[in-house]
Image (cartoon, rainbow, N blue to C red):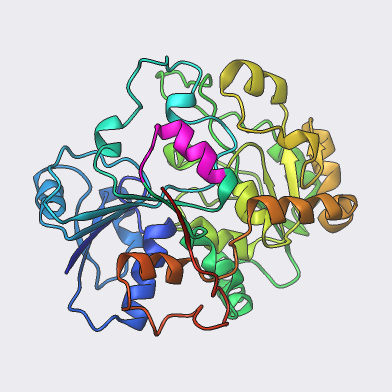
Amino acid sequence: MRIVYNSFDGRFSDSPRALHEALTRHGTGLPLEHTWLASPAHRAGFPEDAALVPADGPEAVAALEAADVVISNYHLAPQWEKAPGCLYLQTWHGTPLKRIAADEPHVGPGDPVPGWRDVERWDLLLSSGPAATRALRSGFRWHGPVAETGWPRNDVLHSPQREDLRAAVRARLGLAEGRTAVLYAPTWRDDVLDADGRRGVDLRLDLEEFSRRYAGTHVLLLRLHYMLSDRLAGAPLPPGVLDVSCHPDIAELYLAADAVVTDYSSTLFDVAATGTPLLLFAYDLEHYRDDVRGFYFDLFDAPPGPVLRTSEQLLDALADPVAATAPWAARAAAFREEHCPLDDGGAARRVLDLVLPGRVAALPGQRGELGATAPAVAR
């Protein structure tokens, strides 16, 4: 069986990575061939034994057209013809708060869904639960089956080994014991462009002031959206600020962090399920909601953490993120129950039990163990 994987146009990350690692770690009894679409800029992030082809071009097309299973977390760039009997599993890459695809303000009712040629090939779409299913169906005008399994990429956040993994990631990042690691992971802005007309970066967080206040006690881990990951490459950053935009997988950064700052990114759903202090830096809330993109629901009516509007407010809260987020504990718990019901460490097992039924008995999440909830498939 030939399985071809893609994550964010050629990275070793996200739910495709989690599914690949589950299969290679536990096995299925089937002869499996694993091939990844890999971009040149991110080839170093793949394991040495991974079979790689360029993320676009004739080799990618050949691999996809020969695949028995395709697993991707985003629209595939190559134009390819799916073979009869091939299963295309679209994992997507997180629960949407901001409106996506056909629901974006600039897309009219009669316009094709962005990436629509790829959507036509999908056989099964993953979701984190009913709220995400509603948004994904709407955004992609998708009427096929949706498997409410949770996101495999988040299994590692609930693993029994998560503390060991956290220590290992922090060591690789050079984070000293006792140092407070703050992950700042904002989404991109449709209306922010650089001098060359490319999507630009507008952090709004005063990095120099962060360094002045906290360089001796904190480290700020800057994680730009994957479409902007090269924008800070080589840029001078003040002491205590580290660009981790090209780190292979954000789940490792979630583990390393003692607090997470985000805005309208799916990061907020991933982190909400972990209990890590979560701060929402919504400096442009009204503009983003009313003019730029819009939301699927009113997160800010009952947010899972403090909503901070200025750099000064955010910097003050970072002095003690635990204390700053404590008043939101009840709201955070309600948010987890509604939006993260399947973040329990067993999503990969549930997905693979659908894709390869009867072949995943060795994976975690069986018979009352962690993650034993059966997946719901909405048709």
Rendering quarter of residue 210: top right
Residue 186 percent coordinates (x, y): 60, 39
Query: In the image, 353: left or right of 181?
Result: left
Residue 262 percent coordinates (x, y): 66, 43
The residue located at (86%, 43%) in the rendering is 316
The stretch of residues the image draws in magenta is: 132-144
Residue 206 percent coordinates (x, y): 72, 35
* Magenta stretch contains residue 135: yes
Query: In the image, 111: left or right of 241?
Result: left
Residue 70 percent coordinates (x, y): 25, 55
Q: Residue furthest front?
A: 379
**Does residue 235 appear in this view?**
no
The residue located at (42%, 14%) in the rendering is 108
Q: Is residue 31 above or below residue 147?
A: below
How many marks the image carries: the answer is 0
Q: Is residue 178 above or below residue 259?
A: below
Magenta stretch: dominant secondary structure: helix
Comparing 55 with 87, the one in front is 87
The residue located at (83%, 35%) in the rendering is 312
The residue located at (36%, 15%) in the rendering is 110
Comparing 350 with 91, the one in front is 350
Q: Quadrant of the N terminus?
A: bottom left
